[in-house]
Amino acid sequence: MHSSASQKQLNTKKTLFTRFLDTVEWLGNLLPHPITLFALFSLVILIASGIAGYFGVSVPDPRPEGAPGRAADGMIHVISLMNAEGLQMIVANLVKNFTGFAPLGTVLVAMLGVAIAEHSGLLSAAMRGLVMGASRRMVTLVVVFAGIISNTASELGYVVLIPLAAMLFHSLGRHPLAGLAAAFAGVSGGYSANLLLGTVDPLLSGITQTAAQMIDPTYLVGPEVNWYFMFASTFAITIMGAFVTEKIVEPKLGNYNVEEASDDLGKDKMGKLTDLEKKGLKVAGLAALAVSALLALTIVPENGVLRHPDTGLVAGSPFLKGIVAFIFVFFAIPGFAYGKVVGTMKTDRDVISAMSASMSSMGMYIVLVFFAAQFVAFFKWTNFGQVFAVAGADMLQSIGLTGPMLFFAFILMCGFINLMIGSASAQWAVTAPIFVPMLMLVGYAPETIQAAYRIGDSVTNIITPMMSYFGMILAVATRYQKNLGLGTLIATMLPYSMVFVVGWSLMFYVWVFVLGIPVGPGAATYYNIGG
């Protein structure tokens, strides 16, 4: 009887949660088309900046004197775009905002290479070969884990892994949007977690060190100070991501209806590999090995031509900066080799047709990027993000929390600010000078503060249109569900955000406050201001 009552109570909770997600989806889908929405957002920012500028809205700048971007009067002012200077800035930068929007070139160049592999049939065959006899649970775990690991080269995760995960789930007879969501959760929701140090580590530690030196001028913070915690977080996020995918997201999505797909991609029938396809995969594999060997010659030797010209290191090297070019080559050459064997690509015309077809399918994404780029630029110019960040920090400070509850509130605050400032380093550059000295004064080390910030900065990436690649994810999702709206995507990703923020914060609490383990090599947990 007791077991039956517990099960009934659990089912009621599930129903309430499902209703909540349905409401989020319904409300989100009441909004206009995402392109119209970004255009309206841009208009709202213009009007709001005019009102805020008229009333002189400003907050004290927490950055030290002489810091880049700090105004002479020590204040952050909302900049009005509803005046002659604002109009001049908008007109002069309209095209530059669009062409300079980071994900645009990245996505288009990478997609040219992926298109060859896709249209030759290589991706379809590789997916089918990969999933034969694969365990359902292991596939989900591997997709989330691969997403987290891909953060070392973030474009790879967004441009390649997320679309591939959707294909992989579809080939298994599962809902492709569940695969997309699982990969997106790993790549973006688990952004700070990784087994190795990434490009974000030195960026954040440099900002943390500058903020810490406001209290202790001799304090040093290295790139490795969060490595222990982020290494362990990789496995925690993998488990949480797989759990949410299988227990919440996939059941809610239900069975996939191929008639909802917007093109032939969602309607492919996945059968067993033929002998010719197997031969094609072997040749493509050899081509991929050859490409990998050539790339290795440029980066593995100490005198590799694509290592950093000054330091000789891989970090900050042309190789990492040019990762998109290598994505293009890595998919294009094996894709063509496979097509040549199976007969889907015979001449250069077939290759050109494949790339052209891929670009024609990106039309809506390109239009969306135009309006999204304007909105992101307007928001940055007005300083609204920085003003909200400082005001939020002041509110947190005024509450007077201490210990673990202070950190939970801090993580939530960072998650909220992340909805408006998409860049991890841009957000930390504004908030670190507030939070690091504030939390050092109540006894916590900068390394621990930075680890907590990275949780908040990661968990809301997947539910904010301010995230650079959000438009691309939306474009991929609409290939499988043509009428999919912004609300559906946010409602699909919301359970990951909720579970990640609770689970990751609890892990932080146990790690720091219960077990007292340092968050990285040589990292202190507490700071003694008198010492």
Image (cartoon, rainbow, N blue to C red):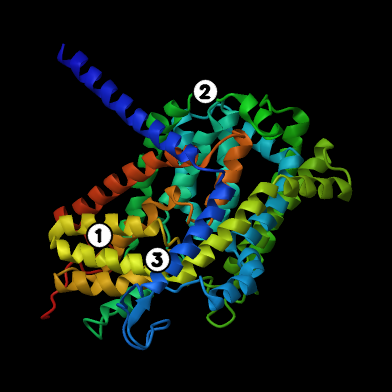
Query: How busy is the neighbourhood of tag 3: few (under 14 within 10 Å), some, or many (20 plus)?
Result: many
Determine the image quadrant of residue 516: bottom left
Determine the image quadrant of residue 98: bottom right
Residue wearing tag 2: 255
Residue that appears at 13% across and 78% down: 529
Of callouts 2 and 1, the N-terminal one = 2
Residue 407 in the image: x percent, y percent?
21, 58
Pick the quarter of the image with the N terminus. Answer: top left
Real-space Cα separation, disc 2 to disc 1, in angstroms? 39 Å
Residue that appears at 60% across and 49% down: 160
Query: How busy is the neighbourhood of tag 2: few (under 14 within 10 Å), some, or many (20 plus)?
Result: few
The three-letter code of the residue at mark 3 reads: Gly
Query: How busy is the neighbourhood of tag 1: few (under 14 within 10 Å), some, or many (20 plus)?
Result: many
The three-letter code of the residue at mark 2 reads: Asn
Pick the quarter of the image with the C terminus. Answer: bottom left
Residue that appears at 40% across and 73% down: 54
Image position of 315 (left or right of 330): left
> Is label 3 in a helix, a strand or a loop?
helix
Residue wearing tag 3: 385
Real-space Cα separation, disc 1 to disc 3, in angstroms? 17 Å
The three-letter code of the residue at mark 1 reads: Phe
Q: Is residue 425 visible?
A: no
Residue wearing tag 1: 410
* Residue at far top of view: 1
In this view of the protein, which residue sits in the foreground, 445 or 61? 61
Whether 4 is drawn above or below 80: the answer is: above
* Residue at far left of view: 530
Whether 339 is drawn above or below 329: the answer is: above
Q: Is residue 45 visible?
A: yes
